[in-house]
Amino acid sequence: MKAFYLLLFTALLSISCNSVKRTQNFVSQGNYDEAIDLAVKKLQKDKDAKEYDAHIRLLEEAFLKAKDENNRQIAYLKRENSPAGAKEIYYTYLDLEARQNLIRPLLPLYSNEMGRKANFVFSDYSNDLLAAKDAYVGSLYQEAIVYMQRNTKEDYRSAFNVLCELDEVQPNYKDVFQLKEDAHFQGTDFVFVTLNNHTGQFIPFRLEQDLLDFNTYGLADFWTEYHSKRENGINYDFGIDLNFQTIQISPERISDRQYTRRQRIQDGFDYRRDRAGNIVRDSLGNPIKIERYKDVSAVITVTTQQKSVFVGGTVVYKDVNRRKQLNSFPISSEFVFENIFAKYRGDERALTGDDRRILSNYFIPFPNNEQMVFDAGTDIKERFKEILRDNSR
């Protein structure tokens, strides 16, 4: 048992030495916050434990050096006086505050190694934080205004992103909500979609509605809006023409074919007899039976109903402002209605499993032309959706 405790103590001492070495390495490499985090985690377990004593000295050293480095960084950034610097100053003050809040619950910390309490000089950063936050928020606001004054789609989008960042730091600041609305509106590509029927045939109204209901496309594009009806106050950037050029509907066709199915089936049995006509029996006295087979057949008439539709056209992208065609994509779909059923005459026992399956079918009224075009339009919509998704900016 004594040996066990000795081994346990040795293992704990080894772990402690390794953690001290890691903390020392962090400090020597200038990774002060990593050193602070590691030391704090050890001291949170038991700040009075002998094996953690060395971490108190290292925590004091890392804290002092980190604070000094941050203060020198802030002084330089204040002299530089740049918008990017305002952000860095604010977050550096947050780091200074967070570092103190991490250590404060552990105080006081007495180090046997140093023979004294660790010395942490904490500062009140509340005023500095408020000033840095005001400067940072102000720089973001001015940056967004500059982007918006450039009056391009991309700059409005950049302005929107900057305003979102500002909103996270300081909600409800000035007129940021309205500026975000304006930046989003001005940065959005508005696309007007027109469905054109050049086929000379009727296109179902519900198909038109379905194709132009962009809420069902699931595109989820924040910077693009598709409209099928013009709205006041919107200058459309792009146009899309969905042109139906061909609708070919075949006539209703019914065709028959016949085939004969033949099977040799068991049809009862006979008793085996000897030459005298007597029934022959086995060793147990049971009559010996002989299976009797019979050839049966059935004539099957298979009827096939068929009707098809082909819908073809193009999707044309246009730059409305430059009055220029940007691209064109073919789009087409074919839908085939087919129904197969059958009847038979003859002996049912000649039928196979496949025969029985189609015999359970029956005649179905042909879909009308409108329904056929609508069914083909379902595939057209999927293809149209792919084109919209692949060509959104």
Image: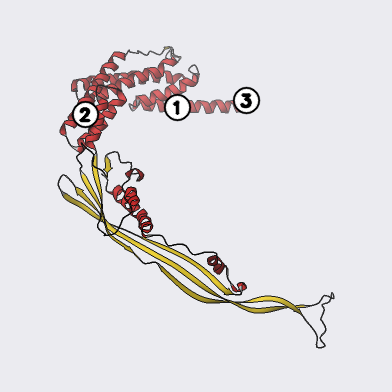
Q: Upstream in the sequence, badge 2 or badge 1?
A: 1
Instruction: Determine whether, in the image, residue 122 is placed left or right of residue 195.
Output: right
Amino acid type at circle 1 is Ser
Amino acid type at circle 2 is Ala
**Quarter-of-image position of residue 268:** bottom right
Residue located beneath label 3 in the image: 2
Dot 3, how many residues are within 10 Å of its Cα: few (below 14), some (14-19), or many (20+)? few
For marks 1 and 3, give the CA distance: 26 Å
Q: Position of residue 199 (x, y in %)?
A: 26, 59
Residue located beneath label 2 in the image: 144
Q: Position of residue 288 (x, y in %)?
A: 79, 78
Name the residue: 40% across, 25% down.
23
Q: Upstream in the sequence, badge 3 or badge 2?
A: 3
Dot 2, how many residues are within 10 Å of its Cα: few (below 14), some (14-19), or many (20+)? many
Residue located beneath label 1 in the image: 19
Screen quadrant of the N terminus: top right
Do tag 2 and tag 1 residues touch (Cβ < 8 Å)? no
Q: Nearer the viewer, residue 221 or 237?
A: 237
Amino acid type at circle 3 is Lys
* Residue 265 showing in the rendered view: yes
Dot 1, how many residues are within 10 Å of its Cα: few (below 14), some (14-19), or many (20+)? many
Q: Upstream in the sequence, badge 1 or badge 3?
A: 3
Do tag 1 and tag 3 residues touch (Cβ < 8 Å)? no
* Residue 69 showing in the rendered view: no
